[in-house]
Image: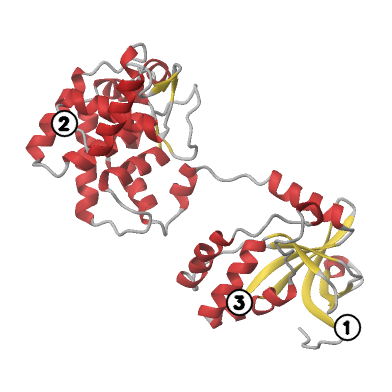
Amino acid sequence: MQNMSESNFHHTFPAVRGIQAGRPCYIAMCPMRIIPKLFIFDEDEVPPELRAQRTLNKSRIPELSSYLIDNHADYTLSSLTASVDANVLFEPISDTGIGQNMGSLSIPMDAHILINDGQHRRAAIEEAIKDNPELAYDNISVLFFIDEGLSRSQQMFADLNKHAVRPSDSISTLYDLRDTISELGRYIQKQVRVFSRLTEMEKSSISNRSTKLFTLSSIKNASKALLRKGNKEEITKEEKELAIKYWNEVAANMIDWQHVVEKKVTTSDLREQYIHAHGVFLQAMGQIGADILTTAESTWKKKLKKLKTIDWARVNKDWEGRAMVHGRISKARTNVILTGCYIKQALGIKLNPIEAEEEKNFKHGK
């Protein structure tokens, strides 16, 4: 890249040319050190109707910047998308064949280059380079479009974000090898027999026709509550083994779960008719376990045997307002707590202060 400041000079990048919707576009690899200087971000004071982007959410920047710094040898950043409000020059390496769409892209130095998608990545790159200057020599791919005015840029932003699909929590848990809580979820799913047979690994909800009973994300979240772990806290081998022992003991006292494993009843029938076939139950049991695992193993195992005595049927009116709201299963925080309160009382376990307050409010409101 040329390092000149006069308006008649250009930034030049190796690039590939393509066509989208009849318009030329270019993919170039840009050094990270020039990203903060090259790309303009509309300032907050500009009214929304005159901007081509949403306001920068500064709270997102530290997390993304830390990701780059902490994983400087093993990070991944998706492409930026930008609009250039000037005539660009593309010089192919040949006139025919594949080379006619490979070459160098020259952009005037006085051109305004506006980010349509990736403004938070741009800001995070700027912050990360301050902490780790070596990142400045890495590259990020940029998809350049020729600017056709504000309305076109605004439409591009809307299209890019409207059609972006956020991955489910389950598939993120399955693929995220850095996150300790995700690793816990995967480990528990493999080691607990009933989970290993009946877990939906990709989706965070279960369809009516599915042969699965649990989601990987619900196992992860319930086990996180069980061990009272934060998102980045380390988890010892002993803690993992304790969690496995707990969930195996829960499963041993859930007769209907065993019937599903033995194919005596279908998962769809269980979900349709019972509370214990839903995430609200698993999360509640995680929170209950966090309290009782502080007691002797013989004590909490004895308590869990009483799970067999609870009427889990959705027609049991006791579940309304707890695991259900107007007849529908709810995983809201209050419903998880109230579900746990009901189970705790059935098991003869004292409510903690937060649960006692929620239980009081629930009974007062009835």
Above or below for 161 versus 31: above
Q: Quadrant of residue 90?
A: bottom right
Q: Quadrant of residue 365?
A: top left
Viewport quadrant of the N terminus: bottom right
**Could you tell me residue 242's position as x and y percent?**
19, 46
Viewport quadrant of the C terminus: top left
Farthest residue, direction front: 364
Circle 3: residue type? Asp
The earlier-in-sequence mark between 2 and 3 is 3
> Which residue shows up at 92% across the image and 71% down it?
95
> Which residue shows up at 32% across the image and 33% down it?
337
Q: Observer-nearest residue: 100 or 14?
A: 14
Asked whether, in this view, residue 73 is left or right of residue 259, the answer is right
Q: Nearer the viewer, mark 2 or mark 3?
A: 2
Picture disc at residue 96: none
**Disc 1 from disc 2: Cα separation:** 75 Å
**Disc 1 from disc 3: Cα separation:** 27 Å
Circle 2: residue type? Ile
The residue beneath circle 1 is 7
Above or below for 260 versus 59: above
Assign a secondary structure to mark 1: loop
**Disc 2 from disc 3: Cα separation:** 56 Å
The residue beneath circle 2 is 349
**Could you tell me residue 224's position as x and y percent?**
32, 46
Can residue 194 be seen at all in this image of the molecule? Answer: no
